[in-house]
Amino acid sequence: MYTLKAAKGGHARSPKLRLTLLQLPPMSIISTPQLLRSPLNINTVSTTLDTAIKQGTTDVFANGALGESGAAAILVLIQQLQPGILTALTNISTKKSLFDALPITGLGSVAKANIKTLSTDTSTFETALINASPADIKLNATAVVNTINTAFTTAIAANTSEA
């Protein structure tokens, strides 16, 4: 999964951006020991990703309104990231039964908490970016945001309880 993180530096209306690649462990793991490590890895990655999202939000607030070219560049990056985000959230939903089958209770609760936290913090980041964008960018940005938020809602619903 990828996340966009605004980096310090650059003009306030056109912040430099850096793309941080965060790899989720593969969900097609067969052996139980590997599968037991997978939720722990996902939890670690989720925490790291959430920290990056929060920092991105802080940076958007610190930089103020985005210029046309900066907002357009951010929108293109998010559109490029969207398939990976949607795939990760779909995998979390469709692979839930693998985690439910593990001999450790509570993994579903951890997953649900992580997804809810990421959803909330992603929504705050999205809102900050949209509010900082010029009017002509907002419509396309809102469409992307709605698609991502729908995927979060589906993933949260899929993880409402443990088996």
Image (cartoon, rainbow, N blue to C red):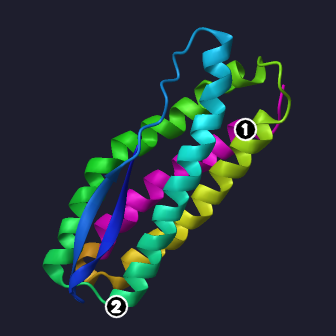
Indicate the amino acid at tag 2: Gly
* Mark closest to the chain's N terminus, 2 or 1: 2
Say whether residue 159 is magenta. Answer: yes
Say whether residue 64 is magenta. Answer: no
Which image quadrant is residue 117 in? bottom right
Numbered disc 2: secondary structure: loop
Give the position of the C terminus as an image quadrant: top right
Which image quadrant is residue 50 in? bottom right
Instruction: Spot the residue most to the left.
Output: 69
49 left or right of 60 in image: right
Numbered disc 1: secondary structure: loop
x and y percent of residue 27 in the render? 53, 23
For label 2, the residue is: 64
x and y percent of residue 49 in the render? 49, 54
User: What kind of secondary structure does the magenta stretch mostly adopt?
Assistant: helix
**For the magenta stretch, what is the residue range?**
138-163
